[in-house]
Image: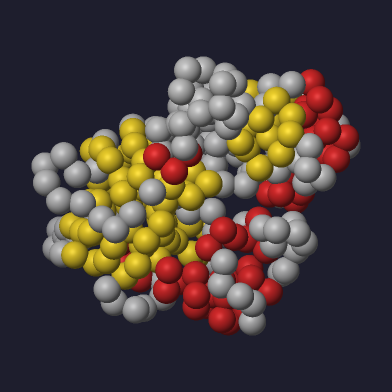
Amino acid sequence: MEIGQVEAIFRYPVKSMRGEALDTASLGWHGLDGDRRLAFRRTNDRSEFPWLTAGKLPELVRFTPQRRAGDGPEGAAQNSASGDGPLPTHVRTPDGRELPVFSEDLAAEVGRRHGAPVQMMQMKHGIFDDATVSVIASDTVRAIARLAGLSSDVRRFRPNILVRSLRPVPFQEDEWLGGVLTFGEGVDAPAVAVTMRDVRCAMLNLDPDSSKPTPEMMKAVVRANENNAGVYGTVTRIGRLAVGQSVFLRAPEKRGHE
């Protein structure tokens, strides 16, 4: 069943930092190529989740990963909108400085703001909280913003895939649980099994431009849908994502009484 179209694709090269909008992207077994492959590790943290996120340092959302022509691996000058570019070579800080991504200067700047030392780490298969792919419908984004009394800004939700639904109903993603989303047509179309709801955290409250908290957002999600907005999924078929692709849902199988 066709349920809509891919309205936007987003990738976040450095965990909790500003994302980038893509026209196309390669969907691999570990999510979008280049998504959340870098993160700052809190060097004094010995827990199972030592990564520095915007929950600990809200200003991280104002740091912007960038690629410079001629820097880094071959092909670094490639336009990020193609979706196949390499990892970022630099990060632009909120005060406008551009620092090499693995430099001591960048680690020192982030550590100073955080109040504890950090180290940039690269993980081949990415650094994810719950699952490798997140999907949300634009109707859900608009409904939450309207309920919160704020402007609609999908960047707050940090999805990988934004879907423009044929049926304008918010929180319809909950109906996708247990099903499979296919993006585009043909036997090689990428597919994602929808495995769980996206339970929202306080990061939703952060204004993407100022990093100032607006708790009305999370309160709205709690009231409207028990703090769930969007879904997570696991890749079941790799392939090429593109804005404008049709999105199909294979509904979950219904089981009878045993």
Question: Can residue 45 be seen here?
Answer: no
Q: Residue at x 19, y 65 (%)?
A: 2
In front: 234, or 22?
22
Where's residue 191, x and y in %? 25, 45
Q: In the rendered view, how is the structure colored?
A: secondary structure
Q: Quadrant of the C terminus?
A: bottom left
Task: Look at the image and tell me whether residue 162 can be seen.
Answer: yes
Residue 111 pos. (x, y %) = 83, 32
Location of the N terminus (image quadrant): bottom left
Q: Is residue 100 left or right of residue 155?
A: right
Residue 247, given in percent of the width and then of the height, sits at 25, 58
**Left or right, 140 with reference to 193:** right
Q: Quadrant of residue 48?
A: top right
Residue 118 as seen in the image, left or right of residue 155: right
Residue at 35 percent across and 67 percent down: it is 164
Q: Residue at x 56, y 72 (%)?
A: 152
Q: Is residue 172 above or below residue 113?
A: below
The residue drawn where x is 56% and y is 58% is 155
Is 23 drawn above or below residue 43 in the view shown?
A: below
Q: Is residue 117 above or below residue 171?
A: above
* Residue 4 pos. (x, y %): 27, 66
Q: How many marks?
A: 0
Which residue is nearer to you in this view: 50 or 81? 81
Question: Is 254 located above or below residue 126 in the figure?
Answer: below
